[in-house]
């Protein structure tokens, strides 16, 4: 099923301010919060959908990319950088939007009941260079990425064996501490990250000898990236969960793929259109001919009519680049240029001088007048 427009999900316009986007997300999150709608799968999906929309629209760079390319510009799977989000991901990322003590006044996942802190790995950025055929048709790339991976000795826990860690005595394994204070309004309960275990809920007593307690080691992974047709230079795609692993079994970061285009030897890209400059001699233009024109899928034959003038543009519809959002394809524009020889033999000069005197080789007066008025008109545009 196709994703809904993120602005539609939050009920805001494209011109909405960051404050309006934040307010709209808060209202949606409260409306569909799982504690308010226990066991309601439809509300849970709408809750996740709102979080995904907010993750994109609250980030200036991602919002700009979404406004330009739509869902295709956000990678293959959209928000939360393409990962399969959980409730813990949402509360970990956006819980503070409702204030320090709780998630909109609800329990369960929110506020002090949120549970242990989830570490998140850092993002990685790589550049992928595509040729014009790969841009036009889409492609799949397998890349070997050097990054931090989960330690294979301790399985990312950072501890030496199953007895290498113990439950934090300060927070009793919850990852949070609660402080109750009195005010004129009565008792106020505030929760914060446990300072002893840094929100992890446990303390390592014996560190893994391979990763020294970090749960990470240097490694590499072969990542398969599906690139949609119509991407462009400078566009960035996200592959969720394929960045650096997180410390001690947290959520991996994302792999950010920056698109670069390889220059084609004959075709020039202009957004979704392609341009080919065809150089013809004077006899070819005067007599006409059939010319072979390169396209993305091979050469095609195009008839050049006799008497074709330089600077004329022939349009081959649908022979350009497909739109990244699926709105059709561009065209191939063939621009005609007259090629003038720079060196002539004496015999060639004589032949041209003879032709120069013939009636059909004289420039008609109406052509001269039209050219003059066209230039004068251009001065006032």
Image (cartoon, rainbow, N blue to C red):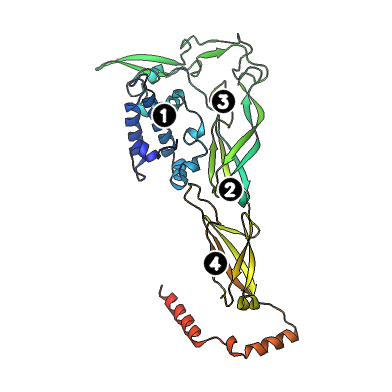
User: Badge 3 is on which residue?
Assistant: 246
Image quadrant containing the N terminus: top left
The residue depicted at 35 percent of the width and 24 percent of the height is 33
User: Badge 4 is on which residue?
Assistant: 314
> Gap between marks 4 and 3, in whole Å?
55 Å
* Left or right, 276 with reference to 10: right
- What secondary structure is found at the residue carrying circle 4? strand
Q: Quadrant of residue 144?
A: top right
The residue depicted at 67 percent of the width and 86 percent of the height is 352
Pointer 4 and pointer 2: residues touching (CB < 8 Å)? no
> Gap between marks 4 and 2, in whole Å?
23 Å
- What secondary structure is found at the residue carrying circle 2? helix
User: Badge 2 is on which residue?
Assistant: 137
Residue 365: x and y in percent read 50, 87
From the viewer's perspective, is the residue at label 3 or at label 1 nearer? 1
* Left or right, 348 with reference to 304: right
- What secondary structure is found at the residue carrying circle 1? helix
Q: Which mark is residue 48?
A: 1
> Gap between marks 3 and 1, in whole Å?
23 Å
From the viewer's perspective, is the residue at label 1 or at label 4 nearer? 4
> Gap between marks 2 and 3, in whole Å?
35 Å
């Amino acid at each position: 099923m196709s994703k809904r427009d993120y602005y539609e999900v939050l009920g805001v316009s494209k011109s909405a301010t960051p404050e309006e986007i934040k307010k709209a997300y808060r209202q949606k999150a409260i409306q569909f919060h799982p504690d308010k709608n226990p066991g309601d799968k439809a509300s849970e999906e709408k809750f996740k959908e709102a979080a995904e929309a907010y993750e994109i629209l609250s980030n200036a760079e991602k919002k700009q990319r979404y406004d330009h390319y739509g869902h295709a510009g956000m990678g293959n799977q959209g928000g939360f950088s393409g990962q399969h989000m959980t409730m813990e991901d949402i509360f970990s990322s956006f819980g503070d939007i409702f204030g320090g003590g709780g998630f909109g006044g609800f329990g369960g996942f929110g506020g002090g009941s949120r549970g242990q802190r989830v570490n998140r790995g850092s993002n990685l950025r790589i550049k992928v260079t595509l040729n014009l055929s790969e841009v036009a048709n889409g492609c799949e790339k397998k890349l070997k990425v050097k990054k931090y991976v989960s330690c294979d000795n301790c399985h990312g826990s950072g501890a030496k064996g199953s007895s290498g860690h113990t439950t934090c005595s300060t927070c009793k394994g919850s990852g949070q501490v609660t402080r109750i204070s009195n005010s004129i309004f009565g008792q106020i309960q505030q929760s914060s990250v446990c300072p002893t275990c840094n929100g992890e809920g446990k303390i390592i007593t014996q560190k893994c000898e391979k990763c020294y307690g970090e749960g990470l080691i240097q490694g590499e992974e072969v990542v398969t990236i599906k690139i949609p047709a119509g991407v462009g230079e400078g566009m960035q795609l996200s592959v969720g969960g394929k960045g650096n692993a997180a410390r001690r079994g947290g959520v991996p970061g994302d792999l950010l793929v920056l698109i670069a285009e390889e220059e084609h030897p004959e075709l020039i890209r202009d957004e979704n259109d392609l341009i080919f400059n065809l150089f013809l001699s004077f006899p070819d233009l005067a007599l006409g001919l059939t010319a072979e024109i390169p396209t993305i899928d091979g050469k095609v034959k195009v008839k050049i009519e006799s008497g074709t003038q330089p600077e004329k543009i022939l349009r081959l519809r649908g022979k350009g680049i497909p739109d990244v959002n699926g709105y059709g394809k561009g065209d191939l524009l063939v621009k005609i240029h007259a090629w003038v020889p720079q060196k002539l033999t004496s015999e060639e000069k004589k032949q041209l001088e003879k032709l120069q005197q013939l009636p059909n080789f004289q420039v008609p007066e109406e052509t001269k007048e039209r050219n003059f008025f066209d230039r004068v008109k251009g001065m006032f545009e």
